[in-house]
Image: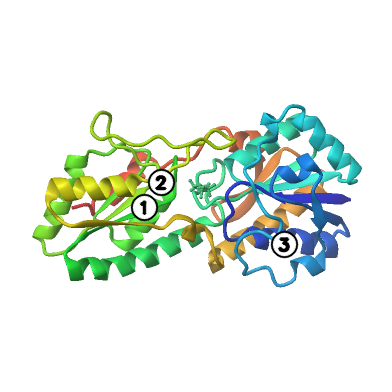
C-alpha cells in the first residue's frame, strides 16, 4: 500500500513521534510505502508532497513541531475541494490517508471518509478537547510548560507583592488552565466553560493578600466575564471560523489593579506552550497512537480515530470523536475551586 500522512491545525509536541511510529512500523512490519503531504489539508488540496521513509524519520522522536508542516487550510471551504483531494491522492498513487490533527483537521477527515476516501485519524491538540479519547498528545507537554512558568511567577509575585496573571491557551476548553492551575497552586483559575464574576475574583485576591501570600491567577485565553460585567475586544476569524484570541490577561490586569488597588501584571505564555520537545508521556502516547493508526490502515479500516481509553489504545468512529468538544465538567472545576482564595 501507499499511504499519505499529514499534520493539520495548530502544531503540538509529539507530532513527529506519531509520524516516526507510523513509518517505522509501516515499512518494517508491513512493507508499505509513504508519502508526506505538506502543511495540513493544503498538501492534498494542492498536491504538495514530500518524500517520507525511514531516513526522513530518523532522529525526530524528541523534536517539537512537525517535519510535514501544518496549516489551518479548510478544503471544505474551497469550491470542489473534496474532488481536488480525491484527484491528487489518485495521481500520487495514495490508497489511504493518516490525518493527525484536532477537531478541525479530523472534522475534515470525517467528511472525506463519508465521501468514500480511506482515512484514519490520530488525535492531537494541546487543548485536550477532542471527544472520544481520554487524552490527546501535546497536552501533557503544554501543562508542564505552564506549571514551570507558574512556579517561577510565584517567587517574583511574592518579592513584589503583586498579582500575577498567567494567560494560557484554550479557546473553548479550559483543560490547560485547570491542570496547570491545580498543579501550580493558582489562587484562581478562569476557564471558558464558566463565565467569571470579576468581583469574586477580586475577593479571592484580597483574601490571598490578607494571608500574606501573593496571588496567581491562571486564565484560559477563551475565558469570558459573566454577561454585562466587563467588555472584551472582538478578534478576526480563521478559515474554520474561530476567533483569534488573546487579550483576556491584559483586561484582567487592568480591572484587578483598578478594583483592588494591588499592582497587577500579566504574562501571556502563547506559543511557548506548543513549542519544543515533548514530555516522555507525550512521546509514549504519540508513539502508541502511531503504531495503532498504521495497524488500522493495514487492516483496511477507515473513518476511525485511534483513542486512549484508560491505558488502552482503541479505535472509535471519527464522526463520534468530532461530534462534540470535550469541555471541563462542573465537578472537575469544583475540585479546583476548593483552593481558590
Ligand atoms: O488548537 C490549539 C491552539 O494552540 C489553541 O489553544 C489556540 O487557541 C490556537 O491553537 C492558536 O492558534 P494559532 O497558533 O493559529 O494562533
How far apart are labels 1 and 2 at the CA level?
8 Å
SS of the residue at dot 1? Answer: strand
x, y percent for residue 313:
63, 53
Front residue (pair 302, 77) = 77
Q: Position of residue 293 (x, y in %)?
A: 72, 51
User: Residue at 66% of width from left, 68% of height from top?
Assistant: 61
Residue 102 in which image quadrant: top right
Residue at 78% across, 42% down: 46
Looking at the rendered structure, which numbered label has been put on residue 167? 1
Name the image colouring.
rainbow
Task: Identify residue for label 2.
Answer: 246
- Viewer-nearest of labels 3 and 1? 1
Q: Are marks 3 and 2 in contact (CB under 8 Å)?
A: no
Q: Which mark is residue 150?
A: none
Badge 2, how many Cα within 10 Å: few under 14, some, many 20+? Answer: some
Confirm or deny contact between disc 1 and disc 2 (CB under 8 A): yes
**Disc 3 versus disc 2: distance between alpha carbons?**
35 Å
Q: Nearer the viewer, mark 1 or mark 2?
A: 2
Above or below: residue 275 compared with residue 95: below
Mark 3 and mark 1 lie on one chain; the one further toward the N terminus is 3
> Residue sitting at 33 percent across and 42 percent down?
331
Query: Callout 3: helix, strand or loop?
Result: helix
Q: Whole-percent x and y of residue 116?
A: 80, 31
- Dot 3 beta carbon under 8 Å from ligand 1: no
The response on whether ligand 1 sits within 8 Å of label 1 is no
Q: Is residue 151 above or below residue 286?
A: below
Residue 335 can be seen, yes or no = no
Residue at numbered disc 3: 21
Q: For this view, does 81 lie left or right of residue 341?
A: right
Amino acid at each position: 500500500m501507499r499511504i499519505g500522512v499529514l499534520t493539520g491545525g495548530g502544531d503540538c509536541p509529539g507530532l513527529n513521534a506519531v509520524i516516526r511510529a507510523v513509518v517505522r512500523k509501516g515499512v518494517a512490519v508491513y512493507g508499505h510505502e509513504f508519502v508526506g503531504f505538506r502543511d495540513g489539508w493544503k498538501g492534498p488540496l494542492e498536491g504538495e508532497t514530500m518524500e517520507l521513509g525511514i531516513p526522513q524519520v530518523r532522529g525526530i522522536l524528541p523534536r517539537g513541531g512537525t517535519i510535514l508542516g501544518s496549516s489551518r487550510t479548510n478544503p471544505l471551504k474551497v469550491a470542489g475541494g473534496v474532488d481536488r483531494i480525491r484527484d491528487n491522492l489518485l495521481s500520487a498513487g495514495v490508497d489511504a490517508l493518516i490525518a493527525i490533527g484536532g477537531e478541525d483537521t479530523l472534522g475534515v477527515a470525517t467528511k472525506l471518509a463519508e465521501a468514500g476516501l480511506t482515512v484514519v485519524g490520530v488525535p492531537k491538540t494541546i487543548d485536550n478537547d477532542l471527544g472520544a479519547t481520554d487524552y490527546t498528545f501535546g497536552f501533557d507537554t503544554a501543562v508542564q510548560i505552564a506549571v514551570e512558568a507558574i512556579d517561577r511567577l510565584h517567587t517574583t509575585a511574592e518579592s513584589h507583592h503583586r498579582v500575577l496573571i498567567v494567560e494560557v491557551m484554550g479557546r473553548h476548553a479550559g483543560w490547560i488552565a485547570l491542570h496547570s492551575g491545580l498543579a501550580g497552586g493558582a489562587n484562581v483559575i478562569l476557564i471558558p466553560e464558566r463565565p467569571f464574576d470579576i468581583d469574586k475574583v477580586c475577593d479571592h485576591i484580597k483574601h490571598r493578600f490578607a494571608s500574606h501570600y501573593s496571588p496567581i491567577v491562571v486564565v484560559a485565553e477563551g475565558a469570558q466575564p459573566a454577561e454585562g460585567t466587563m467588555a472584551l475586544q472582538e478578534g478576526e476569524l480563521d478559515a474554520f471560523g474561530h476567533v483569534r484570541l488573546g487579550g483576556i490577561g491584559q483586561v484582567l490586569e487592568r480591572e484587578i489593579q483598578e478594583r483592588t488597588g494591588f499592582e497587577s501584571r500579566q504574562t501571556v505564555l502563547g506559543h511557548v506552550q506548543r513549542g519544543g520537545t515533548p514530555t516522555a508521556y507525550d512521546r509514549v502516547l504519540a508513539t502508541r497512537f502511531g503504531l495503532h493508526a498504521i495497524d488500522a490502515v493495514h487492516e483496511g479500516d477507515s473513518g476511525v480515530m485511534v483513542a486512549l481509553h484508560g491505558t488502552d489504545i482503541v479505535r472509535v468512529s471519527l464522526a463520534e470523536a468530532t461530534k462534540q468538544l470535550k469541555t471541563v465538567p462542573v465537578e472537575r472545576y469544583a475540585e479546583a475551586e476548593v483552593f481558590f482564595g
